Amino acid sequence: MKQPRRWHFLCGFALAVLLVAGLGEVFLRLFPPRDFHDYLGERNPRHGPYVPDADFGLTYQNWDLFANDHAERLRFLGPLAPTSTDARPLWAFFGNSFVHAPGMLADTARQNLHEKRIFNLGRNEHICVRLAQIRLLLDQGLQPERIFIELMPLDVAILGSHPLESIHVTRRGALTYTPRWPAVGGPLLERSALGRAAWFRSGQQKPKPSFHPRQLNHKVADYLLHDLDHLFGRVSQITGQRHIPVTMILIPNYEQVMEGAPFAFQEQLTPLFQKHGLDVFDARACFFKETDRPGLFLPDKHLTPRGNRMLLSALLEHVHHREGPSLSTVAERKP
Amino acid sequence: MNFTEGRFVYFFLIVYALWLCCRGNYRARLVLLTVSSLIFYAYHEWRIVFLILAYCVVDWLIGLWLARTRFPTGVVSLGVGFNLAVLCFWKYTPLLLRSLAWIALRLDIPAPPVPEHWFLPLGISFYSFTGIAYMVDVYRRELTPETSLWRFTLYKTFFPQLVAGPILRPRDFLGALQPQTLPNRPEAPLEASLLIARGFFKKMVLADRIGLAIDPYFVHVSDLSTAGVWALPYVYLYALQIYFDFSGYTDIARGLGLAFGFRWPENFNLPYLAGSVQEFWQRWHITLSQFLRDYLYIPLGGSRRGPRRTSLNLMATMLLGGMWHGASWTFLIWGGLHGLYLIGHRWWSGSALGLRLRALEGMPAWLWRGVSVLLTFQCVCLAWCFFRLNALGEVFACLRRCVTCEHGQLFAGGSADLSLWCLLGGYGLLIGGIAQLRQRPAIRDLLAHPEQVAPLYRGFAWGMSVALFLLAILLTPTGEKPPFIYFQF
């Protein structure tokens, strides 16, 4: 192609690209995709119930917002403390769906431990929100005999890709993260909706883009250990002031039990929790005692009823050893 | 493998690069395209490659046998029977078992076990039909049997059209695979890139976005959680979703075909602008309609045996067409509805009022055309309810909610997504604008003879296709993206 024709071709090409890019820029400014909202800072259109917090990065603005959000659940659970009509000691479970989903650990405890009243919320939350909920409930009068905090690699995965320092709360109360920008061209990408979209689609906007949850089975990175040290140090202080013992429940994931993944998560976090005076129940032993290990898991990798009973029995045995012979095991109590 | 998967882009680039390298060698091209098609098909489940190879070998042998046998009817019946039997086994076994279990429950007798998970080989409905078309054409002596198993395997398995069409006629496609005709250069690369870009935009931006907005509603359509929400916008959005999804796939398939030098027929021609259901089926999944017409409707007698037999033939064709789409009684009802529509249209076309309205001219004709298009669209959308929902209870709940809603629930949930309606409106304007532009001689020349048109226009067209493709990637919604809808067939 001769020189002028080549230039005409390139001009036409550039014109088309600019036209399409312009339309895309307008559309993305008007309607940023939902998965980008978390990285838009004050441009995030979402509203939320949070305010910044020095202990956990964020907390609820007030009790009413939390209570309204969990109204049905709180109605089901009843009073936060023992009453004259129900003086049973209260055990509070906090964790992910392995704890609160129907039929999981908390429900299993409720069905088998009649001498205790079981308290558990019903939703998966960001780990920082979960810990802030514990403090909020304690401030509002929750009086548990013991707190159980279940923790698995998937719970801290969000901190692995978005460390504590990247968490912010907008003026509208929504949780956002400070995105990472490239060293070259960062300001341009920040200003352009199309540039932001391209950057965000690449996944490079995450503060730790190379993090993958499966790494937690092999090694917990130092920055993540530092964040967990801070968070659970505060949990220890808050519960210690109220003289409430805390047991950390470390449930092994499917990959660790069935596929031979290492236990670095448990091995690195146990001394960290113990340093803060938190009791640790590492549940892997009871899993490996089982001959029929596949039968412990549902297709979605949660635990079967047998798996939950096994876990509860092992947990009670652990607490029994710590507190003394005040509880019979689940096995002894079977009809 | 799926066209919208990232790994497909790598797969295509490698195969295309190899194809460009071996363009001078017929056998090398044949083997490359065949092997890469089998890899494409078996990528997620390697065992199904044996199924498609079994189809290829049996259909090829039947074709050769037909040329030698004195009992061609018996042989072609055997071949067609094999194709249909295997298709029915994979597709309809769960439906049969569920139905038997339902009957057994009511009769209080032991029920057969119903498998929880049943694997449906990708695209089996399409390649079983291409096999049937081949054997019937050989039987009718409209086609000489293919002697090369490689060429026949490529005919059945060529990856751009393997899993969701267009359904290619054996005489056209097999004819293009011969030593003298197998393309060794791309056909209309500009048109190919525009088709591919348009297809990705339709699927990734429009169809997927609609799917994410409306799927939660249809999952809960008979629940209290959606009580009072007007269902009609969701039904309209589903009509658009299935159109963009399927036509987007076809655009990509045709674009890829052009890249390898094959020009395939249009499969969609603005179907929702049809003024009757008969016209709808001339614009929607055109290759399937023609297949059903040529291999089912006409052999049954077509319209040659009086109005009653014609109605029966239409109903049988549409019922079977419905069952082909899916293994559920709702698909049968969907086909039956279209059969009723076609029968009704035949009656209406011959009525005095119908003839008078067809003879209108000027503005009254335009008005009547508009009314016809709207009515046809409503009829098609009504039938889509049976296509989208698998349980009759859900279908009737959806239909009830199309005509009732609570105050403030006219556009609620996903149907109130303003970004979606802006995208659809913008796309509609763009299509309308392009349709107007295509009337201009300069644009017709660009597409027909791009090398003769000014470089500025060619550069613009190339820029549009590249930019549109990249924009589709940026605008694609995240979340659980729906697969191509027609992949389930």
Image: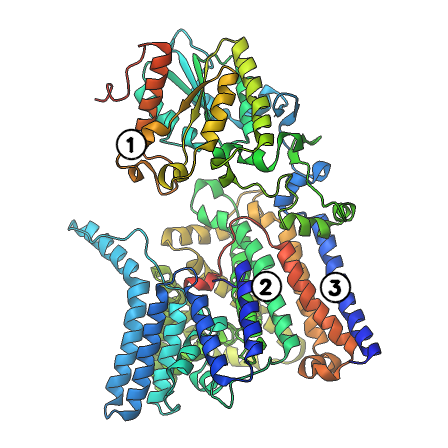
Please determine if labels 3 and 1 lie on a single subunit: yes
Q: From the viewer's perspective, is residue B51 above or below residue B472?
A: below
The C terminus of chain A: image quadrant: top left
Q: Amino acid at mark 1?
A: Arg
Under tag 2, what secondary structure? helix
Q: Position of residue B122 (x, y in %)?
A: 40, 64
Left or right: residue B391 compared with residue A157: left
Please, what is the three-letter code of the amino acid marked with disc 3?
A: Val
Quadrant of residue B319 in the image?
Answer: bottom left
Spatial CA span between label 2 and label 1: 47 Å
Q: Amino acid at mark 2?
A: Phe
Nearer to us in this view, B336 or A299: A299
- A218, B49: nearer the viewer: A218
Residue designated by label 3: A17
Discs 3 and 2 share one subunit: no
* Cα gap from disc 3 to disc 2, whole angstroms: 17 Å
Classify residue B488 by image quadrant. bottom left
Residue under numbered circle 2: B200
Local packing at callout 3 (Cα closer than 10 Å; few below 14, some 14-19, many 20+) is many
**Chain under callout 1:** A
Say whether residue B403 is visible. no
* Chain to which mark 3 belongs: A
Q: Secondary structure at mark 3?
A: helix
Name the residue at 51% across, 35% down: A219
Q: Residue at x 44, y 57 (%)?
A: B388
The numbered mark, 3 or 1, whose residue comes first in the sequence reads 3
Give the left or right position of residue B303, taking residue B411 as reference: left
The residue indicated by pointer 1 is A306
Give the percent coordinates (x, y) of residue B102: 24, 53
Instruction: Measure the C-alpha gap from mark 3 to mark 1.
Output: 60 Å
